[in-house]
Amino acid sequence: MVGTSFKDYVTGIVNLLNTVVVPVIFALAFFAFIWGVVNFFFLSAGYEKKREEGKQFVFWGIIGMVALFSVWGFVNLALSTLGIAP
């Protein structure tokens, strides 16, 4: 396109990441958490090995969501400080 600047390209990429990529990654972390809860409480009531696997899914799902939320917030703060984010 004629007349578009580098800032327009960066803004478009940031918007794509914020509206598509990051929510998909959040959804995957949330589904890992939910799968762990279902596996721990419902699917493997008598199997300790399966319960331990469910516990690991819950743990890493929570860690993933906290890490994603922290990094996403920091990146958006930095972008708005630099004037790149819309």
Image (cartoon, rainbow, N blue to C red):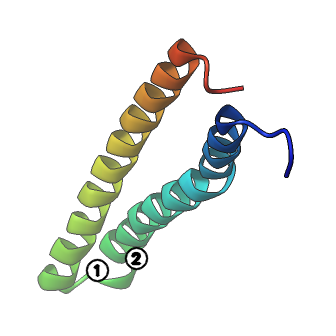
Identify the residue shown where x is 41% and y is 26%.
Answer: 74
Dot label at residue 2: none
- Disc 1 residue type (three-letter): Ala
Q: Quadrant of the C terminus?
A: top right
Q: Name the image quarter holding residue 5.
A: top right
Structural distance between the alpha carbons of marks 1 and 2 = 6 Å
- Numbered circles on residues, count: 2
Q: Residue furthest right?
A: 2
* Residue indicated by mark 2: 42
Q: Check disc 1 and report the residue beneath it.
A: 45
Residue 76, compared with residue 69, is above or below; it is above
Name the secondary structure under disc 2: helix
The answer to whether 29 appears left or right of 13 in the picture is: left
Q: Nearer the viewer, residue 19 or 64?
A: 19
Please determine whether, in this image, residue 33 is positioned above or below residue 66. below
| Left or right: 25, with 11 as reference point | left
Q: Position of residue 35 (x, y in %)?
A: 42, 72
* 10 Å crowding of disc 1: few (<14), some (14-19), many (20+): few
Question: Do the residues bearing badges 1 and 2 touch, measured as CB atoms within 8 Å?
Answer: yes
In screen coordinates, is 33 left or right of 48? right
* 2 or 43, nearer to the observer: 2
Does residue 83 appear to the left or right of 29 in the view shown?
right
Q: Position of residue 58 (x, y in %)?
A: 31, 60
Return the residue nearer the eye: 22 or 12: 12
What x and y, as percent, mark residue 24? 57, 61
Q: Residues within 10 Å of mark 2 (few under 14, many from 20)?
A: few
Amino acid type of the residue tagged 2 in the rendering: Phe
The residue depicted at 40 percent of the width and 67 percent of the height is 32
